[in-house]
Amino acid sequence: MKATIYDVAKEAGVSIATVSNAINGKGKVSRKRREQILEIMERLQYQPSVIASALMGKQTYTVGMLIPDISNPFFAEIARAVEDRAHQEGYSVIICSTDNRDERVERYLTLLQQKSVDGIIIGTGIEDLDILRRLQANGVPLAMIAREAPALSVDTVVTDDETGGRLAAEHLVSLGHRRLAVLAESRKVSSSRERIRGFREGLSAAGIALEEESIAVCEYKVEDGKRRALELLALPPEERPTGIFCCNDLLAIGALQAAKEKGIPVPEGLSIVGFDDTILASVTDPPLTTVAQPMEEMGRLAFDRLAACLQRRDSERQRVVLKPELKARRSTAPAPQ
Amino acid sequence: MKATIYDVAKEAGVSIATVSNAINGKGKVSRKRREQILEIMERLQYQPSVIASALMGKQTYTVGMLIPDISNPFFAEIARAVEDRAHQEGYSVIICSTDNRDERVERYLTLLQQKSVDGIIIGTGIEDLDILRRLQANGVPLAMIAREAPALSVDTVVTDDETGGRLAAEHLVSLGHRRLAVLAESRKVSSSRERIRGFREGLSAAGIALEEESIAVCEYKVEDGKRRALELLALPPEERPTGIFCCNDLLAIGALQAAKEKGIPVPEGLSIVGFDDTILASVTDPPLTTVAQPMEEMGRLAFDRLAACLQRRDSERQRVVLKPELKARRSTAPAPQ
DNA sequence: CTGAAAGCGCTTACAG
DNA sequence: CTGAAAGCGCTTACAG
C-alpha cells in the first residue's frame, strides 16, 4: 500500500499535525524533528496526496486549457509554452480540444470544475459569454489567450490582431494587388474578426473595398480552407482575387492546395498570406508569407496572468497586447497584370 | 458558495447517503425520490466533487500522457486522438512534454502520482526502466504508445517499426541507391532503434552494408536534423550518401533544409525518406516520401488499452502492432549516376 | 515546539 | 427503500 501521513507520523513517533507542518514549513517544528521526518518520508517513499490536501481547501495544482485543437500546430506550440511555465511552478495542464463547438466547451468546463482545477486558460472561440460569466461567478480564475471577451473583466494575452490584419493588407497593396479575398475562421473567433477588420482598414486606406462576398468563412482545418478557396478561385481570371489573406496558416495551406489544383502558380498568379507563423509556414512549397505571433511568449504570459489570479484573487485584470510581425517569404509577389 | 451534497440533501429532506445513491444509481432509491433529487441538483447547480469521491477510493477520471514534445505534430496528432477517446469516456488528459529527459520524466511521474491519476500513457523514451517498474509496483495502470519496454509486462500499441525501416530501405534500394545514411533519434527511443534495425536488414538483403558512421544520432528537433545532415553532406560528392532515411518527419525537414543550404537538389541529387506522415510531410517542398503511422488509431487504441487496465486490473497485457505504410511522394528519385 | 480534534465532500457497508 | 456513522488523507485553528 502507498504510505500515508499516518505511516510517517507513527514511524517518527509524532502526530500527523507535526508531519504536516514539517512538510509545509508551517508552524514551528524543531529542525531536528523536521530532518528526522523528512528522512522517514524518503525511506517510506511517502508522496503527499494532492487530492486530500485539495479537499482541505488547498490547490489542486492543475489547470485546464481550452483550445480549438491540439493538433493545430499553432495551439500545440502555445500549449507547450504554457505547459513549460506551469511545470516550473508545479502545475499540470489538462488539454481540452473543443473544435470551437459550444457543447464541447460546456462539457469540458463542467468536467474541469468537478475536478476542481485551480484555473482555466481559454484559447477557444466561445459564442455564449454567459458560460464564462458563470465560471467567474463560481470563482474560477480565468485567462484568455489569443482570444478576447471585451465584455468581461478577465486577464487577456493577445497579439494585436487588427494590426496583424493591416500588415497583411499593406503588404499586398504594396505589391499592387487590388482584388483581394479572405479565408476567415468562424465568426465566433474574436481574433479572426479583428484580423479581418484590420485587413479591411488597411485596404480602404489604399482606396480598396473588401466586398462581403469575398470573405469565405471556414472551419479552421486545411480541407475547409481548400474547399472555400476553390470557390473563390472558380471565378474567371479577370474577376478572381489575385491575393488571399488567410486567418491562419492551416487555411493558407488549404489555399495553396486549391491554387495547385486549379493550376494557378503561387506566387505568380496568386499571392497568399497566412497568419501565426507556425512551423508549417516555413516548410510549405512555396514558403508562406505570414503574420507571426510570438507563440512562446503568449503561452508563458498567459500562464503568468493566471498564476497572478491564483495568488491574489483581488488583483487588477490585465490585458497584454503583443506585436505581430509580417514575415515575407515566397508565397507573395507583385500582382499579375 | 458552491453547493455540496449536504445542500442537496437538506433541500430534499433526505440524508446525503440517499443523494449519493441517487447520483450513482447505487442501492435502491424510489424513482420518485430520485427524480426529486435530480431536480434539486439541477436547481442548485450542484456539481459533485471529483476530489472528494476520489478520496473515497473512486477514480479521478484523469490520466497522464508522457510524450517528448506536444509541439511535435506527430505527438500532437496522437494526443488529439487520445484526448477524444478519453473525453468520450469522461476522462481528461494531462499532457507532459519530457524532451526525452529522464529528470523531467521522473518529475512528471511523481506529480502525476501525487495527483492520483487513474493511469498513464507513456510515449516518451525512457532509459531507466526501473522508473516504470516502480510505477507498476505502486499499482498505476500503464500503456505504452509508439515506444516499447519489452522487459516489462505492459500494454503496448506500436507501429511495426522494423517493417517501417525495411520499407524505407526497399524503396531506396529499388531506386538504385547504394550509399545511404540515417538520421536517428536518441538511442533511448526504442522505436528509433527498431527502425534502424529494419532499415539495415532491408539494405543487407540487397547486399548493402550500413556503416556505423553513417548513422547520425540527433535529438528530435528540426535544427538537430539539419546540423547532423550538414555533417553527412560535407563529404565529397562521390562519397556522400545519395539517400537519407530519417527517423521522423521533423528530422527529414532538417535534412531537406541542409540539402537546400548545400545546394544539393532534392530528389535529383539526394533522396530523403521520413517517418510518421504528419501534416508536415504533405506540405514540404518537395512533399516528403515517408513511412506513415496510423496516428489516430494508435491514440485511440492506447487509451482503450489503458481503460481496459482500469476496469479489470488483472487482465492480460496486450501488445498491439499496427502496419506502417510507405507513402511515396516527391523527395525520392532514382539515385544520381 | 507539539498534539487532539474537527472538518473538507464524498462513499460505503450496515442496520433498520 | 432510507439513514447514521465511519472513514478516505490531509490541514488548520486551538490548547497546552
Image (cartoon, coloured by chain):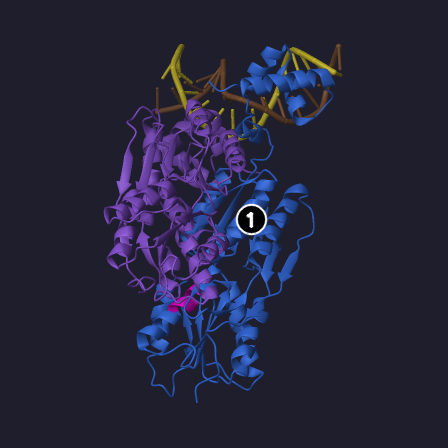
Chain colours: A blue, B purple, C yellow, D brown
Q: Classify mark 1: helix, strand or loop.
A: helix
Visible in this render: residue B145? Answer: yes
Visible in this render: residue B160? Answer: no
**Position of residue A62 measured from the top left corner of the image (x, y, whole percent):** 54, 39
Please name the residue that numbered disc 1 is placed on: A82
Q: Residues within 10 Å of mark 1 (few under 14, many from 20)?
A: many
Residue A240 among magenta residues: no
Does A120 sit above or below residue A336?
Answer: above
Q: Decide which of D13, A328 is in the foreground and name it.
A: A328
Q: Subunit of mark 1?
A: A
Within the image, what quadrant is residue A83 found in?
Answer: top right
Q: Decide which of A82, B152 is in the foreground and name it.
A: B152
Tell me what residue is drawn at x 32 percent, y 39 percent: B157
Tell me what residue is drawn at x 64 percent, y 17 percent: A37
Q: Is residue B219 left or right of residue B248?
A: right
Q: Mainly helix, strand or loop, the magenta region?
A: helix
Q: Decide which of A232, A119 is in the foreground and name it.
A: A232
Does A77 sit above or below residue A217?
Answer: above
Tell me what residue is drawn at x 23 percent, y 46 percent: B205
**Position of residue A212 measured from the top left corner of the image (x, y, whole percent):** 44, 78
What is the count of numbered marks?
1
**Position of residue A136 measured from the top left corner of the image (x, y, whole percent):** 58, 48
Range shown magenta: A249-254
Does B14 sit above or below residue B270?
Answer: above
Q: Amino acid at mark 1?
A: Val
Q: Is residue A332 left or right of residue A321?
A: left
Q: Decide which of B240, D7 is in the foreground and name it.
A: B240
Tell me what residue is drawn at x 30 percent, y 49 percent: B294
**Position of residue B236 measured from the top left corner of the image (x, y, whole percent):** 43, 60
